[in-house]
Image (spheres, grey):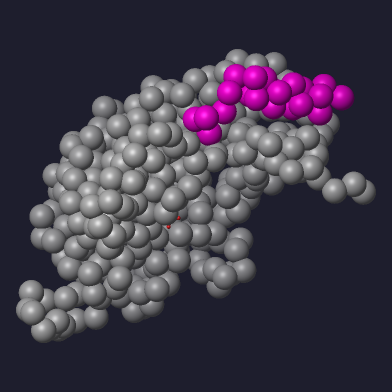
Amino acid sequence: MTADPPIRIHLSPPHVGVEEREHLLEAFESNWIAPLGPDVDAFEAEFAAVLGAPHAVALSSGTAALHLALRQVGVGPGDRVLCSTMTFVASAAPIRYLGAEPVFVDATEDSWNLDVDLVAEALDEAARIGRPYRALVAVDLYGRCCDYERLAPLCRDHGVALVEDAAEALGARHRGRAAGTFGAAGVFSFNGNKILTTSGGGMLVTTDADLAARTRHLATQAREPAAHYEHVEVGYNYRLSNLLAALGRAQLRKLEERVSRRREIGRRYREALTDHPGVHFAPMGDPDESNHWLTCLTVDPLVARVDREALRQHLRSRGIEARPVWKPMHRQPVFGDCDVLGGKVAERLFEEGLCLPSGSSLTEAEQDEVVTEIGHVLGR
Ligand SMILES: *Cc1c(COP(=O)(O)O)cnc(C)c1O
């Protein structure tokens, strides 16, 4: 076996330019080199304005934002928290940080997002036996929002706090409303591979002024306003660096452009690859509302006569990075003892699903190359 060549075409690389560099250097020269400063405040205000949300709090990661969101909606030791099983580990890990137990929910074939019927059944059953769930982490997978028309009232009626993990969905909408604005709190990530990046960072968005203020407090070591550093509770060191906030402000101005580029990439893949039997694209709903963070497809091995892994490995041998879709959380060893509602849909998507290079800096020539290589495998 020959070793794979270096990756030339990445899945979703950081996409930054001279504006980001200038902003970063201005912040550097101002000497605001700390997890607070004018760019943090401005980034929060500008981000909130873009989303049409009243409050945004800049944090060190999306994971930190989920941790603080769950803590503040009251999740604590022994609580049960519903969570999409088709997701990155960061949606579920903070549930465990708080001593609570995730209960995973399967996806649906026609959305890849969590199955609202399963949630409804679980909440009815929980009410019947008197063992309520504290919260629900709903993940907007690959940039498509969950069905919040049904989820939001369901959570409200059952007294379950809705936390929206919109880490992959910045710039997406649902019935005209921005992703991240549907729950008690919405969470974003600025990791290197997301729609926008600050190298690492996150944001918590909420309509609740108290929750926003408490998030800032908890994220700065729960320091009371006293010259001598007074503390009445244990907090965290979770604020975003001012340097990175400066980078984020420059990125934010390009949000629309970045999202429309990813949409265009998704559209081109679909157009070029629909004719292959056994290949199905992830159902993205209204293509003008999803942000198409990653374009994903499934390969049915019985029809396509080739499986996902063969396709992935071929691409890799050509220096092209593609990735299996998220391994369901209920199949992760670390969550092996957790309950799961359903699970078979997510398991099949994991077996057959592949994420294609989808970064906003992908050129048309690079995309054509990916399409050609996929054609070589599927055409066999
Ligand atoms: C990236 C991601 C996160 C976490 O983000 P970090 O900023 O890396 O901590 C959370 N949930 C989902 C679904 C993600 O894709």
Q: Residue shown at 49%/30% (left/top)?
A: 360
**Horizontal side of residue 182 vs 306, given as left or right:** left
Q: Residue shown at 65%/19% (left/top)?
A: 365
Quadrant in which residue 145 is drawn:
top left
Residue 280: in magenta span: no
Residue 368 locus on image (x, y percent) = 67, 20
Quadrant in which residue 98 is drawn:
bottom left
Q: Nearer the viewer, residue 107 or 27?
A: 27
**Magenta extent:** 359-380
Location of residue 273 with respect to 14 vertically, above or below = above
**Horizontal side of residue 205 vs 119, given as left or right:** left
Q: Which of 55 and 141 is in front in this view?
A: 55
Location of residue 227 with respect to 36 vertically, above or below = below
Q: Is residue 164 visible?
A: no
Query: Which quadrant of the rendered structure holds the C terminus?
Result: top right
**Horizontal side of residue 124 vs 205, given as left or right:** right
Q: Residue shown at 10%/55% (left/top)?
A: 209
Location of residue 165 with respect to 75 vertically, above or below = above
Label the magenta part by its dominant secondary structure: helix
Location of residue 252 with respect to 233 vertically, above or below = above
Residue 122 locus on image (x, y percent) = 39, 57
Residue 301 locus on image (x, y percent) = 78, 36
Which residue is most to the right?
A: 1
Q: Residue shown at 62%/39% (left/top)?
A: 10
Residue 62 locus on image (x, y percent) = 38, 55
Q: Which of 315 and 246 is in front in this view?
A: 246
Residue 360: in magenta span: yes
Quadrant in which residue 234 is drawn:
bottom left
